Image: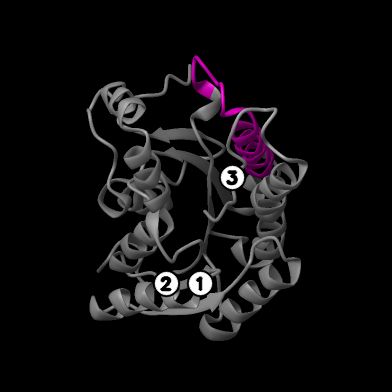
Amino acid sequence: MKELEGKVALVTGAGQGIGQGIAFALADAGVNIMVTGRTQEKLLNTVAEITKRGGQALALTCDVKRKEDLERSVSQCIAQYGKLNILVNNAQEVPNGLLHDVSDEAFAAGFDSGPLATLRLMKLAYPYLKGDGCIINLASTAAKRWDMSGYGAYAAVKEAIRSLTRAAACEWGPVGIRTNVILPHGKSPGLAWWMERNPEEAAEFQASIPQRRVGECEEDIGRFVVQLCSDGSRYVNGQTIAVDGGQAHLG
């Protein structure tokens, strides 16, 4: 029997990259997946691959900045599968650039799609997660960079997610919900785009990772999420875990 057989997960931003890798790994562990994102074609590709592997998944378009879309995601998940055991908050618009270059609109979109969407979805999922639920939020090691030039706004919205994660772990632990946050380095399309256009900085970035490579979205990030959702991690709660080959020092 697979370690998470029969459980149900809702994964945001699952049409590509890390969200897709997490969805694949969870499905391989026996989880039924509600995959959400803004682009239907990408979501259908994710569902097709999960189905090909013998898993079950359902695609639903969702803009995490829209509260009604988040409400629909949870209600459709319950209507389809009758329960919800795992919530993965992955989707996020990130405000990149120097502080003088980040517009109010981009910064607000970062908060709307990041900490606000994360909080909304956690609260919507709460009634169904009680008992044996697991929440995995995604943040970033950007706030741990020695030089945060160009990463201040991005790190700010991600650090807010870390704070919400810790609060949820403390407030909801007594009702059987575990909440953790991971800080992943994965070969997402966004990271691949950045590395291609900034080869020198990308080379330095990779050299700063003790394992000297960027993680695979499914094999490294997704499978770790499976472990974090399994009974073997049942006493892990409220933690920030860098899944980055040893680059960040969180002490």
SS for dot 1: loop
Task: Give the distance between the C-alpha atoms of the residues marked 3 and 2, in whole angstroms.
Answer: 20 Å
Q: Are marks 2 and 1 in contact (CB under 8 Å)?
A: yes
SS for dot 3: loop
Image x and y of residue 41, in percent: 43, 77
Residue type for callout 2: Lys
SS for dot 2: helix
The residue beneath circle 1 is 39
Does the magenta stretch mainly form a helix, a strand or a loop? helix
Image quadrant for the N terminus?
bottom left
Q: Is residue 30 visible to us here?
A: yes
Residue at 65% from the left image edge and 78% from the top image edge = 75
The residue beneath circle 3 is 94
- Up/down of 133 relative to 211, above or below: below
- Up/down of 51 relative to 46, above or below: below
Residue type for callout 3: Val
